[in-house]
Image: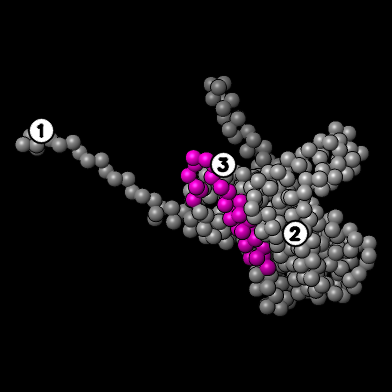
Amino acid sequence: MRVAGGALVRRWGGRAVGLAITGVGLYIVAPSILSLFGAWPRLADVEPWWFPVLVVLEALSFAALWWLARLALAERAGDGEPPPVHAGWGTLATAQLAGNAASKVVPGGPAAGGVLQARLLIQAGQPAAVVASALTAIGLITTGVLLLLPILTVPALLIGPPPARQLELGLLVSLILAIVIVGLGFTALTWSRFVVVVGRIAGRVIHIVKRSVTADTCSAALIAQRDRVAAAFEGHWWKAVFAAAANRMFDYAALVVALAALNAHARPSEVLMAYVVAQALTLIPITPGGLGFVDAGLTALLVVIGLSADTALIGTLLYRLISFWLPIPVGLLAWTGWRIHLHVTRPTRKKAPEPPAAGDDE
């Protein structure tokens, strides 16, 4: 009886704790979620043509992730091993959309989404080891791009321009940043000395607040992560860094367009800082996809950079409608279609022939 009870606790205890944390988190952010949805009728004031523009930008952001997965899964097979099954664009898109939707509705967030995405890719014939390596590399390179954005934004914040009334320049900013990110990313993947210097500098800074971290340990950890990414995208480094930059920059451009649709006045560099902080909040697995925390955080940050509370609220709602809520039903449809596809294409088991009866051989 004790063994059964212990097994039950081990199986469901962690899930129960996770659900409890998610419930508390949703309770805390419920007022912000309600206020956000209370502003839903205000979207009727937005010109209709802005919506397809936002959808296209977010679709391009998602397509960059599919490209990254295609590059990572193009890993060569080892000696004596059969080559991996070629992953088609439909499979990659279905797996990513389904995993993304799961990360937004299932407790556990990115972890649950990653498991579902990996499961679909493995069912499509990809080796489990290759899938695990590919998804890890994709997570590392996209997170690295996100961490790089604040550093690239600091000079723009110090210089001051462009004027607040030229928010549309944010689209040009996203293009320039993408080019810079590609250059820095390729340098990091090909020049170890550059990574060592960056790691040592970061280690000294972190050592101030966390004594256990040193310049050497931070540099070694950074080199190890770089090597994992470099190995996963070997032969496709330029394309991989470009795809990772495109994923973030198209998403940032969607936020800029959402604010431009409301005739908001803000500096693109400040909007980028708000975007980076909001994306960092999605990594906190309290609520699925950062639900509530990201909305409240982004709204508050937009107010801090000078937008009115009303504009910040509607802008956040418009951006999150396309980047967070719309992909959920799309991902559900993708997963449903995949299940139907598996059911239709699954080979039927042939019934074993019955042994011949006595006398049949005469």
Upstream in the sequence, badge 3 or badge 1? 3
Which quadrant of the rendered structure holds the C terminus?
top left
- Of 323 and 38, nearer the camera is 323
Q: Which residues are magenta?
A: 57-85
Frontmost of labels 1 and 2 is 2
Frontmost of labels 3 and 1 is 3
Q: Which mark is residue 358?
A: 1
Q: Position of residue 172 (x, y in %)?
A: 79, 71
Q: Residue at x 67, y 62 (%)?
A: 61
Q: Residues within 10 Å of mark 2 (few under 14, many from 20)?
A: many
**Amino acid type, label 1:** Ala
Q: Residue at x 65, y 73 (%)?
A: 52
**Amino acid type, label 3:** Ala
Above or below, 123 relative to 341: above
How many angstroms separate mark 3 from mark 1 (CA)? 51 Å
How many angstroms separate mark 1 from mark 2 (CA)? 76 Å
Residue identified by numbered label 3? 129
Report if residue 72 lies within the magenta region. yes
Residue identified by numbered label 2? 182
Q: Position of residue 174 (x, y in %)?
A: 77, 66
Q: Residue at x 39, y 55 (%)?
A: 344
